[in-house]
């Protein structure tokens, strides 16, 4: 499946995510995105630094497509942030970074499960 297929069919098609993007592991290239989900490379670079040191994420928040969200959990593989009842899951696989937005009608754990499963699968096939 193409990168765009992972975004459209696996993530958005799950109905647990309404917008998503996949970037290269170095955060320097956009591989696929939902229409209108304009995550900037600078934002992805900040996410990468957050995987290494999460303290700035907790104090300064996370910006995704220009929106500031409050970080609720961050470690070396994933970052979760919310703005009201909607939020974002950022999970990295061995060769990519998945950024997925979920609407207020979806619980964070449901979206996190879909994104985490995709990241684990991509890692298992070398991506």
Image: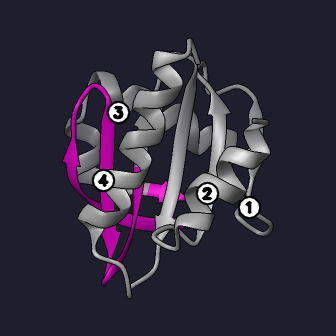
Question: Which is more toward the observer, 122 or 73?
Answer: 122
Question: Which is more toward the observer, 73 or 105?
Answer: 105
* Label 4: which secondary element: strand
Label 4 with label 3: CB-CB less than 8 Å: no
* Label 3: which secondary element: helix
- The residue singled out by tag 2 in the image is 20
Label 3 with label 2: CB-CB less than 8 Å: no
Q: Position of 46 compared to 7: left or right?
A: left
The range drawn in magenta is: 63-89
Rendered image quadrant of residue 42: top right
- The residue singled out by tag 1 in the image is 34
Marks 2/1: CA distance? 6 Å
Rendered image quadrant of residue 36: bottom right
Is tag 4's residue or tag 3's residue first in the polypeptide sequence? 3
Is tag 1's residue or tag 4's residue first in the polypeptide sequence? 1
Image location of residue 95, percent across then percent down: 57, 18
Label 2 with label 1: CB-CB less than 8 Å: yes
- The residue singled out by tag 4 in the image is 80
Marks 2/4: CA distance? 14 Å
């Amino acid at each position: 499946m193409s990168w765009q297929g992972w975004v459209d069919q696996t993530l958005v098609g799950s109905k647990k995510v309404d917008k998503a993007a996949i970037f290269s592991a170095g955060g320097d290239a956009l591989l696929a995105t939902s229409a209108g989900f304009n995550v900037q490379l600078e934002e992805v670079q900040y996410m990468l630094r957050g995987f290494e040191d999460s303290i700035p994420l907790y104090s300064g928040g996370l910006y995704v497509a220009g929106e500031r969200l409050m970080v609720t959990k961050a470690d070396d593989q994933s970052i979760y942030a919310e703005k009201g009842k909607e939020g974002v899951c950022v999970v990295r696989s061995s060769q990519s970074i998945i950024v997925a937005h979920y609407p207020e009608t979806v619980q964070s754990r449901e979206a996190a499960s879909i994104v985490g499963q995709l990241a684990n699968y991509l890692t298992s096939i070398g991506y």
